[in-house]
Image: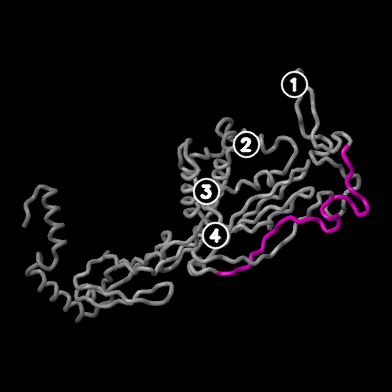
Amino acid sequence: MSKRDYYQVLGVARNATEDAMRKAYRRLAMKYHPDRNPNDAEAEERFKEAKEAYEVLTDTQKRATYDQFGHAGLDAARGAGAGPSAAEAFGDIFGDVFGDIFGGGRRRGGRPGVYRGADLRYELALDLEQAVFGTTTEIDFHTTVDCKDCGGSGAAKGHAPVTCETCSGAGQVRVSQGFFTVQQTCPRCRGRGSVIDKPCTACGGQGRVRTAKRLSVKVPAGVDTGDRIRLGGEGEAGRNGGPPGDLYVEIAVREHPIFERDGAHLSCEVPVSFVTAALGGSVEVPTLEGHANIKVPAETQSGRVFRLRGKGVRPVRGGATGDLFCRVVIETPVNLSDEQQDLLRRFDSALAADSRSHNPRERSWLDGVRKFFGGSGG
């Protein structure tokens, strides 16, 4: 199946800035994240598709290739020549989607055939309370590490890599093509500058082995979906003595049964009886730190929002603590007895005598309907 256009996937124009793509990706990530769409294969594919599109379009070189040649150009670039593997080639494309919580530079090898290890990504699902107040948790993942038997050299015990005779250790060879001389990766050592006559049996001459790993991750208070924690040097081992990559822990906050989060602010619905709404009273509402009370004035209508300052979230990068917005929802009583129903009918009859005073919104709405259909107000 052919891939969709990356710009269409993110829903941005072809001249979109990186900031616009970051916002678009964040919106799609929150919408299609597997934790929010359990057992939904289509949502999972959309999530992966958005990731791939963002990773390509925020890499200047890959974006230029894609703009000129499309998906075919990227496929050719991934498969051409020697050098790092596909995972390693894409290991450094973690752009600032949301900004790392703990950032830092990336180290690269400068010697022939020395490649930095691939970056890894781990998606960490958190409850809202864990994200707001911070937590420490352990994660399990698989990565590649230097082979203990050969110390990462790839050669069997008692042996060592020898300088490649074809390129004299440069990792590159010059090939004449007509009037031009082109420098290419050495076909014998594949850019390493050395060859292994007797490979290590434990790693098959790769110098690295795959293993399971467990790490303790400290999540700072205030993180939100899309934030990342960078664990330097915890990615895959480098090749031929190259530095390891990094591990990026990407945060995904689970939906909460009561609260919804919008940046530093929280919101929730508060059911209120129509008696309290009509006569006024005090209503207890939940917060992430316990309970609070709001004073509901008489004649409160459904949909009114009350603001509790400082009861929201303190952003991870600093700034003022957000607020909690409580939206009143008038609750209609259910399972009424015959006596209670009769009381309500009598109450309604008493109001009907002067409905304009007691139900101004209803009367205003009815007058508007009559005018719309060309009738006269009653």
Distance CA(mark 1)–CA(mark 3): 46 Å
* Disc 2: which residue: 74
The residue sitting at 43% across, 68% down in the picture is 257
Spatial CA distance of label 4 from label 1 is 51 Å
Say the numbered circle drawn on residue 251. Answer: 4
Amino acid carrying label 3: it is Arg
Where in the figure is residue 92, as x and y percent of width and height? Answer: 64, 47
Counting other residues with Cα less than 10 Å from the Cα at mark 1, is it few (<14), some (14-19), or many (20 or more)? few
The residue wearing badge 3 is 46
Mark 4–mark 3 CB contact (< 8 Å): no
Distance between the Cα atoms at labels 2 and 4? 29 Å
Sequence-wise, the earlier of marks 4 and 3 is: 3
Q: Earlier in the sequence, mark 1 or mark 2?
A: 2
- Which numbered disc flags the more N-terminal residue, 2 or 4? 2
Q: Is residue 218 above or below residue 210?
A: below
The N terminus sits in image quarter: top right
- Asked which colour scheme the image uses, the reply is one colour
